Amino acid sequence: MPDLGKYAGEVLSAYGISLALIAVLLIVTLRAGRRARAALKHIEREGSPDA
Amino acid sequence: MIALLVRDLRLALRAGGGFGLGLAFFLILTVLVPFSVGPQSTLLSTIAPGVLWLGALLACLLSLDRLLALDYEDGTLDVLATAPLPLEAALAVKGVAHWITTGLPLVVAAPALGVLLNLPAQGYGWLVVSLALGTPALSMIGTFGAALTVGIKRGGLLLSLLVLPLYVPTLIFGAEAARRGAVGMSVETPLILLAGISLGCVALLPFAAAAALRMTIR
Amino acid sequence: MIALLVRDLRLALRAGGGFGLGLAFFLILTVLVPFSVGPQSTLLSTIAPGVLWLGALLACLLSLDRLLALDYEDGTLDVLATAPLPLEAALAVKGVAHWITTGLPLVVAAPALGVLLNLPAQGYGWLVVSLALGTPALSMIGTFGAALTVGIKRGGLLLSLLVLPLYVPTLIFGAEAARRGAVGMSVETPLILLAGISLGCVALLPFAAAAALRMTIR
Amino acid sequence: MSIWEYANPVRFLALSAKVQPYAWGLAAVGIVVGLVWGFFGTPDDFRQGSTVKIIYLHVPSAWIAINAWIMMLVASLIWLVRRHHVSALAAKAAAPVGLVMTVIGLLTGAIWGQPMWGTWWAWDPRLTSFLILFLFYLGYIALWAAIDDPDTAADLTSVLCLVGSVFALMSRYAVLFWSQGLHQGASLSLDKEENISDVFWLPLVICIAGFTLLFLALVLYRTGTEIALRRARALTARQERVA
Amino acid sequence: MSLRLRDVAVARGGVPVLSGVNLRVEPGNTLILRGPNGAGKTTLLRTIAGLQPPLTGRIAGAEDTVAYAGHADGLKAMLSVAENLSFWARIYGQHDIGAALDAYHLTQLQDRLAGSLSAGQKRRAGLARLLVTGRPLWVMDEPTVSLDREAVGWFADCLRAHLAGGGMAVIATHIDLGLEATVFDITDLRAAPTELLGASDEAFL
Amino acid sequence: MSLRLRDVAVARGGVPVLSGVNLRVEPGNTLILRGPNGAGKTTLLRTIAGLQPPLTGRIAGAEDTVAYAGHADGLKAMLSVAENLSFWARIYGQHDIGAALDAYHLTQLQDRLAGSLSAGQKRRAGLARLLVTGRPLWVMDEPTVSLDREAVGWFADCLRAHLAGGGMAVIATHIDLGLEATVFDITDLRAAPTELLGASDEAFL
Ligand code: HEM
Ligand SMILES: Nc1ncnc2c1ncn2[C@@H]1O[C@H](COP(=O)(O)OP(=O)(O)OP(=O)(O)O)[C@@H](O)[C@H]1O
Ligand SMILES: Nc1ncnc2c1ncn2[C@@H]1O[C@H](COP(=O)(O)OP(=O)(O)OP(=O)(O)O)[C@@H](O)[C@H]1O
Ligand SMILES: [Mg+2]
Ligand SMILES: [Mg+2]
């Protein structure tokens, strides 16, 4: 861990917030993507949107 | 009643995100203020509490327009008026739904926008408290105004015109509380008065609104 | 085209006075500002030009909502789209009608409201000039926004969200000109730029608006 | 074979399936290497102290935020002129990524501003234009969400993107005219004079490359999602008609 | 409980439209209102539904038993058909919407947004709403507008089932619905312009 | 000039609804579209009127000759009947609205605000609008909704006069209008779900 001096709070929170936002974006993207692909596969197989 | 609340919230979410939009308007308004009065940060921080209150008020106001109008146009109000649910309750619920979709997000977002206007650090808490106490009154007064103007084509502006004077006391006490909070003065009196207004509005205005609505749809 | 203009103006006059209402909103907003930022006259006179411009902009914005929505709902737009009049011309005329009923009264009334906010004496002229040059752009941009959102239920707030960022350049130059005028600085550059924006909008945006409208009513 | 072949969803998906593993992998490598190097391996600036390390997030995200909009503009044009569905969907897929990057740029900038300028926010032209960009993203996404016919939505958002870009440019000039800045000018320019020192430069470039690849991977994947949604919608609609 | 109107007069826009309306609908019966355009059918129906007060006379047996279906359908474009119906069902304290969906053959369409239906499909959803109210008195203003012949048949079936269960219906229509019903012609009940009925502009006559 | 549709396919909400529509209307003739609810009548009429493009095929003879009357009347509630009609007359470069008022017996009502008319009176004013367009091809979606019998007769008279003057009409309706007209049933033209017609969702099938 490098010595961040008196700005440790700023630097770490910047990294924390940014990485968290990117992680949220990734999770949302992947989750929506999986769900959409699964639904599509289901429709292609069963021929019906529900059930 | 819960059915109505759920439906209103669902509609707000679905019809292009009624949730986000009041908020977005609030944001945009806050952004436009520096464009119009200039970028000096001391000036901005002086007017910040007032601008934020005014912005919240206008965001509420803009969304009132269709609080009842859509239900009127597609005949929902006619049916609601003949349904077992008392119209007073229905309107109170509609007011609550409006607050949840508009007032609440504003309360939550206000601090972030305070940053844009250089609101002094001590002002954030009181800003939020005053908005939380005041926005229910804004929603209920708005419901009443919407009930008064519902059958009128192009009622949007008329509605604003009717409602804005009714908003004055809420605005005065709310903005005063936020302003005093920002400069570190005591905020008790305006906050108590604000809470009083809100309580009164929530308790009494549904009746006035229902009476008005019965007349408009006649 | 003149028929359309006359009809729109007549409707504005009749439907609860579209004329007066934009104005009334402008007035009320100006009155609310002292309530929200506090009554100190120096502060008010500093922010006066900005507030008046912002008020004009919001008054325009509020009235946009139903610029096309009513015509859409009652089927008028369908008929207009199949009528001999090109849609571009029809939308330009609607923009003009909107300006006459909203922008023009604001220009005329702004000096009176300047008094309420202690606008410095030298500022009146430039305020009026800048509003006169800028409001046509506001009306045309608004027409474009209305064409984009017309088929959408509860489009009012979405319309504001889309239109407000488009208003930014107009607002900046307009308010800057009014502000410089109020403190006696040279106003040429912002005024020329403002006029340029207005001209560009009036010349080009009807085409964009007609294209958007053809897509929405499809 | 013309590049327009990839406007066909199937071909696009095939190509995207080939490209994606590399994009994800290289993006991960770039971001990890760049950030780790930047965070652990570079010295503090003599004036800014350790806060310079924020640059490895701030500049790449700002860069993506701006270029995502440009990409959406190009995609919108392609949709309007040639009506390739994949293009419209790619624009739709890119918008939320651009929005998040804008938010990251704004937040890291704000955090950086507190120690450097003594304020979270100032109405500096660059900051202000960035905020306006944020608003454009919001409006664009809201318009997509509000229209249920996908083609109409694509048409209207494309028109908005075009007109919006023109107004965004005008806003940029207006804002420059309206306020003087605090923010640094472009320092990654090719002319060496004002460039930031080499120690910071290399990891920063790696970070920018990593973010760009991440953007690419995300957009490819999200476009795939949009295609799946459209396909599901098309199939259901057709089945309803059989019944 | 039957619906009774005794000597009712109704006004629209401050002007008396009908006067001396006396009618009675017993459980199991349908009343069809007839009259030329502008005779006052809509006005009378709205009065029965309690949406406006009568000028004179008394209406008994309508309050809390009436379900009103006017020209507009009361459907939200952004909600699906099933969501629309369950909303109304819950407002009226009911739960099951399956019967209503079946009656108008809406099961296929139940997940479609109401805004994307054709005119006749919308109307079918609007009529299905009456079935989820559980109310005995249906007051309907031109219910079969834009319905095709088959759908008119479904409507007639529903109505018959409702009547068989002791329900009542008052229907304004210009079309022959092929139902067995009392016809009530309001053409001759037009209020004479000189009649004094307590309309809002009378003080100025 | 006659109206011709050659091999037209139309879509609604991105999904093909009808395909292989071939029809021809000669001056002096009326075509009545029939088909159950949701068959695609409204969609076809809007396509003929030029409000949406056809998926495939060609439409000749409609542009600049068509006057469209949809479900909505295009009347402004806050203008009087006469004002509404003269507005539309001027948009179409005409002047005289007297004939239109007479044809639908609206002279009595001409100074009433359109918003205060009954449903049938409104519809009459909406139909009168077609007379002031001076256009030869009338495209009408369920024109007789809420009209009483007499008014349906007026409508038939107007239409006959229009046809006698070399006009054409395409009408979608579920009701028997008692007109002498070719009937075109679109029930069997329903687009097969697998057909490739260039609909917007096809790239995804
Ligand atoms: C909320 C506040 C801020 C915003 C919205 C913002 C936005 C931006 C933008 C849009 C860029 C341009 C990136 C590009 O052209 O590719 C940028 C670059 C940069 N920013 Fe900020 N910034 C903010 C605060 C700060 C602060 C406080 C600092 C440091 C004191 C800073 C330092 C830099 C540097 C060094 C660059 C790189 C300039 C270049 O190489 O082009 N920023 N920022
Ligand atoms: N706001 C109003 N002001 C004045 N008169 C009105 C108003 N609204 C309706 N009327 C008149 O009241 C009369 C009754 O209207 P109503 O809608 O009840 O007729 P209706 O029998 O339902 O006709 P339709 O068969 O056309 O639907 C009509 O002559 C109408 O013109
Ligand atoms: N936005 C939409 N999305 C998907 N399908 C739609 C949409 N709008 C309409 N449809 C469907 O398209 C079909 C054709 O509708 P259209 O309105 O043309 O029918 P119609 O023949 O006029 O019926 P009606 O007799 O009920 O008026 C219907 O099945 C309808 O459900
Ligand atoms: Mg009626
Ligand atoms: Mg139809």
Image (cartoon, coloured by chain):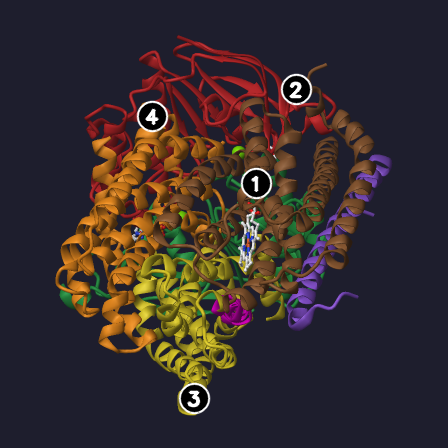
Chain colours: A purple, B yellow, C orange, D brown, E green, F red
Q: What residue is at 87 percent from the left and 36 percent from the top?
A: A45
Q: Residue at x 79, y 66 (%)?
A: A1
Do callouts 4 and 3 point to residues on the same chain? no
Chain of residue at mark 4: C
Q: Is residue B65 above or below residue D4?
A: below
- Tell which tag, 1 or 4, sits nearer the viewer: 1
Same subunit: marks 1 and 2: no
Asked if the residue at tag 2 contacts the one at tag 1, i.e. Cβ–Cβ closer than 8 Å, the answer is no
Q: Is mark 4 on a helix, strand or loop?
A: loop
- What is the number of the mark on residue C86? 4
Residue type, label 1: Lys
The answer to whether marks 4 and 3 mark residues whose Cβ atoms lie closer than 8 Å is: no
**Residue picked out by circle 2:** F197
Which of the two residues, D19 or D54, is positioned nearer the viewer here?
Answer: D54
> Which span is picked out in magenta?
B94-114
Asked if residue B212 lies left or right of residue E125, the reply is left
Which residue in the structure is indicated by mark 3? B187
Q: How many marks?
A: 4
In the depicted structure, whether residue A10 falls above or below residue C18: below
Q: Name the residue under label 1.
A: D192
Image coords of residue D100 (percent x, y)? 63, 52
Residue A43 in the figure: left or right of residue C201: right
Circle 1 marks a residue in which chain?
A: D
Inspect the image, locate mark 3, and give the three-letter code of the amino acid beneath it: Val
